[in-house]
Amino acid sequence: MPIWEYDACMARAATTTDVFNAVAEPRRREILDLLAEGERPVHDLVRLLGLGQPQVSKHLRVLRAVGAVEVRDAGRQRVYRVNGAALKPIHDWVRRYERTWEERFDLLDSVVTELGRTEEEHDHDTARNRRGEGDPAR
């Protein structure tokens, strides 16, 4: 649907109540990727993302609201970590498509293998023709 036909009255889930909407924002996915490597304080996220602290804090607030990240106090720092259980609905949804992907990758493997064989045969025939070993009927 073109943007000019968008129905503004259409209901849309709030970013802070739905993990799918929360992780739809690319910066939030980057934050999750960084936290998947282990716990990090906010200042590390700010440095690694190249964003201002208020922006990172806003994204973390959204991720906390949907339960995707958890926070703990470590002295004067707040340390964040991923809460994998909150991301399970996304995993479960994507998993339904895994079989389709595997089938397509298997098909692609077959095509690539066949192309490789065809190319090898072509190279072999070309080399034989250069050596004068081609079809004597020609």
Image (cartoon, rainbow, N blue to C red):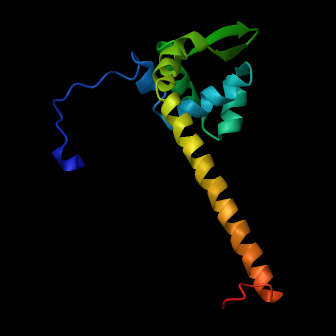
Where the C terminus falls, by quadrant?
bottom right
Q: Nearer the viewer, residue 94 or 29?
A: 94
Residue 29: where, in percent of width, then height? 56, 31
Task: Give the quarter of the image for residue 73.
Answer: top right
Residue 31, quarter of the rendered image: top right
127 sits left or right of 107 in the view? right
Q: How many marks?
A: 0
Question: Which residue shows up at 68% across the image and 23% down it?
Answer: 36
Residue drawn at x 69%, y 61% is 117
Position of residue 6 relative to residue 22, above or below, is below
In the foreground, 107 or 124: 124
Q: Position of residue 9 (x, y in %)?
A: 15, 30
Q: Residue furthest right?
A: 131
> Residue 62, position in %: x, y?
48, 21
Quadrant, the N terminus: top left
Res. 55 visible in picture: no
Residue 93 lies, in percent from the top left, at 45, 22
Q: Is residue 27 visible?
A: yes
Q: Quadrant of residue 13?
A: top left
Say which residue appears at 49% left-offset and 27% top-offset. 23
Q: Is residue 126 left or right of residue 68?
A: right
Q: Residue at x 60, y 14 (%)?
A: 84
Front residue of this view, candidates 111 and 95: 111
Q: Nearer the viewer, residue 110 or 17?
A: 110
Q: Residue furthest front?
A: 137
